[in-house]
Every structure is written in C-alpha cells, then in structure tokens.
Amino acid sequence: MSVLSFRARARTGSLISTESALDAATRIRSTTTDQELPDGRVSRSFTAEDGETHTVSSRNLQDVAPGNKLSCAKKARVALIAIFSALGSALFGLDIGYIGPILESSSFKHDVAHIAKEQKLDSGKEGLIVSLFSIGAIVTAFPVISSYFVDTWGRKASITLGSVVFIIASIIQATSDQVSTFLIGRFVAGMSIGLLSSVIVLYQSEVAPASMRGALSTLYQLGITFGILVAAFIDQLLVDQEEGWRHVMLLITIPAFSLIIGMMCLPQSPRWLVQKGRNEEALAVLHTIRSEDEAAQEHLEIQLEVKKAMQIGEPRWSELCGGRVFQLITLGVSLQLIQQLVGMNAFMYFGPKIFESIGFDKNSFTTINNFVNFLSTFPAVALADLAGRRSLMLWSSIGMSIACMIMGVMGLLFVEQREKGGEQTFVVTNESAGWVIAISVFFFVFNFAYGFGPIVWVYCAEIFPLRYSARGVGMCTLANWIGNFLIAQFTPMLLSGIQFNTFFVFGFFCILGVIVAAWLPETKEVPLELIQKLFDDRAWFCRTVAPPTGESVMSVQDTGSHITQLSAPTRGHAH
C-alpha cells in the first residue's frame, strides 16, 4: 500500500475504509473522463471493477428514481454507522430522563441542596437546574459556534468533542456538594448536547443513501427515547439509595466513552471530505457504503455542488438573511419551534406531577409513558422512506391536535384546582375523565413519537445546500433549544394560571403543524443535492427560483486537494 493510500485510510476511518475501497477510488479517479451533456448536466465515464467502462451523470429532479441497488453488506454497514452515531442522541435522552427523579430524591436534597428529605426543593432552584441545561445547549447550538466545529473540525470530530464534554459535565455533577457546582455541571452538559444535536442527524443524513436516509436519520430521535427509557430504569434502581444519584451520573458516562472509542472507527462524512478537497478519501468512503456506480455518481454531484459554492466564495452570515437560504432557515426554524411548542417536553419534565395531581401513581405512568415514547418511534424508522416525511408529520400533527383538544375539554369539565398541603394541585372530579386524560396523554405521545418528533430532525438536515448546511442546521437546532427552554419555563406558569386550558395552547401549535405539514414538499428518495429544487413551485419560495442564465454546468476535475473548472464543452481526465 502506498504512503498516500495509508494516510487516506487512516484519516477516513479504519473500520470502513479498506484497502480495496482505496484501490477502487484510485482506479475510478485515474480512469475518469468528464463530459458536458447538451442539457447542461455532466457525465462521468470510468473503468469499473469488471473492466467495463461505466457512465453516470449528474441528475435533475425528473431523473430521480427509487434506488435499491445496495448489497445487504453495504446496507448493514450504513445502518451500523447510523445506529452507533445515535449513541450521541441517547446522551441527550439520558440527560432529559435522569434529572426529574434525582431532584425528588432524598439523597440529592441532603448532599447538594442541604435540606431535609421531606422538604421540597425551592421552585426557583428546580426551574434553574432544568432550564440551565437548555441555556448551555443554546450556547453551543448557536450557529457561529456549532458551524465552526461542524465545518472546521468535521462531523466526526464534533461528535467526539461533544462526548468528551458530556463526560466532564457528568463528573462535575457527580462530585457536586453545592447547588452552584451542580448548576455548572448542568450548563456544561447542555453545551455537550447542543453540539451533538447540531451534528449527529447531519452526519447520519450525509452517510445514508437517499433510499435509506429517512429511516437512518430517525435513529437520532430513537436514541433520545431510548436514553430517556434507560435513565428512568437506572433512576428506579439507584436514585433512592444513599448517594445513588451520584452513581447514576457516573453510569451515564459509559455510552459517552463508547461513542468516543467507536467514532475512531467510523468514516468521515463524504460531503465534508469533498468540501475540504479530500476527494480520494471521499470516493473511498462512498465506495464502502454505495454501489460502484452510485458512489461515482454521488461523488460527481457533490463535487459539482462544492465547485458551484467555491465560485461564489466563502459564505457570509449576511447571506442567511435573504433569498432562498433565508426562506429555508425560516421553514426549518418554524418546524423546530412547532415541534417543541406542541408540548411534548411538558409531559417529559412535568408529566409526573400532572399524573399525580389527577389521581394516578406518578412512577407507574411515567414508566408507561417512556415505553410508549420509545416503542412509538419505531414506526418512524419503518415508514420514513415508505410513507414519506410529509405524510408522517401531517398525520402526527392531526393526532396530537385531537389529543390536546380532548385533554383541554376534559380539564374544563372535570378538573378543579384546589389547595392541598399548602400547594395548589389538580383534582379530577370524575374517575372516567381521569382515564380519558391519561389515555389522551399516551395517544399524544404516540403521535409525536412516530411523526413530528423524529421527522422534523430528518427534514431540517435535508433541506440546506452543502454550502450552508452546518449554519442552517445550527439555526434550526438553536430554535429547538429555545423552544425547549420556553416550554420548561412557561408550562408551570400556564398550568398554574389557566390550568388545563394549557392544552388548548398546545393544540393551537399542533393545528399549526397540520397546516405546515400539508404545505411541505416530499423529500423521500431525493438526493441531498437536488432537494432545494423541490421548493421552486411552493408559495413564497417561487419568488427565489434561480432564473436560467444560459450558462451550462461545467465539468469538474479532481486534482487531489482542489476542484478545478474545465472549459466547456470538453473532456478531461483526472490525474
């Protein structure tokens, strides 16, 4: 093996990049001929493994057809990459799931808050502990910060960095003996999850083929629900023991350590590699997760997109404030805000108190709720590439709207607010109404988990051009965390002020979700490089359709660390 090939193999990832993949990349590169077609597309001919000359070309939307040419081995390899990287989102779920029971545990009250076990934690401190996590996430999800790591360090290194920060945060929390120290740990934990939530679904979508991208990107949300479930299980085992909450904090570092080790073996994003001029490595990665023709075609299309971006120059932040990019960011931010403002995290953060107040055992119903949330995410994995993103979000938001309206009506008719033990609590005046409310909660969670929960992340990771993908996804992630913060802060106020009318507020955003989902174009099986064209016929977006300029798309030539333009029409060989 040449020194060049060895270095490419080491940088690309040893588990995925094999010598045969690098040899194939070198063969394709050295025999490539590019030619401009009359319609402006670019064709690429190369010598395939069978010795025959194969020709692929860049595609227009009308050329996109369902593809399922991957071997079982390559499908399994792509799936394993997506599943393992989803450990990062499981860290998100662990952080959501462990905090509620810990704040209620007598050991935590004694060790950190220094109050008696029968006393309640000050509501201001409790709210700050919950919300400071979101503030930390907002900081690192802020596009200036997240795009620096995602674009400069790369997707793979950013996931590793987020895992390291998560471990540091968990150790700070586990060793805390003051609320102030615990708050620092919560803020740092939020910073780790803010970065991870900006990069994981982007990484998953970039390594996945178009025919599997929806299913593999939904694993991000599946990881979150799995983390919540595991956290609830660990809390039940340990949190009531003496200093058990410290053991919980240390146990949740295990998946973070696993992710750090595993990322050493996973590949870089091929889109990021081309963006950095590391074209042979990108082609080697694609060869291990695509068929040979698909690898060559996708490599060509990524090169064309990167070349086009290079001709414009480095992206400026001001470009996010106008034109098509601004419209896409507005759409992504709206979807993420709606995903939070429908109220799902209100049930995750405050569900135990809601269930207890209407006469049910809070631990039993929280456990059931977590199971419903986890199991209901599997339909999203199965259907994202069959039913499509739009259909799942549409039916999901319809189901959530129905659930919220039922809870609101039941609350108006059969729920009263009374003082109990010096505190205001809800009392259900009709047992059947209590069961209807509980079932409606589970129905709401079911609809969120198969639709708006996972699919919004999938959609937002797909819609941005490569030039703006890190910044666009960063803006969407920032919006998600702002929505998360708003829910954590204002749900207790709403429940206290307007009681169960709160669910009508959540229902309004669910109905808004119905309207937006019905408008969205379907993105399933469409290559990432072509998705922006789906919006050309949509209201508002039609104003920013790029007019035909009469200039044809030039072919590209791979010259190691640069992409250069050939005069057109011409034929060129890669060297």
Image (cartoon, rainbow, N blue to C red):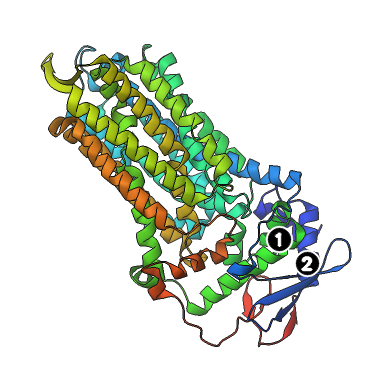
Q: Residue 369 versus residue 223: which sits nearer the camera?
A: 369
Q: Position of residue 339 (x, y in %)?
A: 36, 45
Measured as percent of width and height from the top left, residue 471 is found at: 42, 60
Q: Residue at 38%, 11% (x, y): give it.
A: 241
Task: Locate residue 272: give its quadrant.
Answer: bottom right
In the picture, which quadrant includes the C terminus? bottom right
> In the drawing, does residue 178 fall left or right of residue 49?
left
Q: Quadrant of residue 216?
A: top right
* Amino acid beneath label 2: Ile
Considering depth in this image, is 352 or 289 the residue closer to the camera? 352
Which numbered disc, 2 or 1, marks the residue that appears first in the sequence?
2
Residue at position x 39%, y 28% in the image: 442
- Along the line of sight, the residue nearer the viewer: 138 or 344: 344
Q: Residue at x 66, y 63 (%)?
A: 298
In-front residue for pair 573/212: 212
For the N terminus, the quadrant is bottom right
Q: Amino acid at mark 1?
A: Ala
**Distance from Cα at disc 2 to Cα at disc 1:** 10 Å
- Tag on residue 295? 1
Residue corresponding to mark 2: 28
Q: Residue at x 31, y 17 (%)?
A: 105
| Residue 242, image x, y percentages | 36, 11
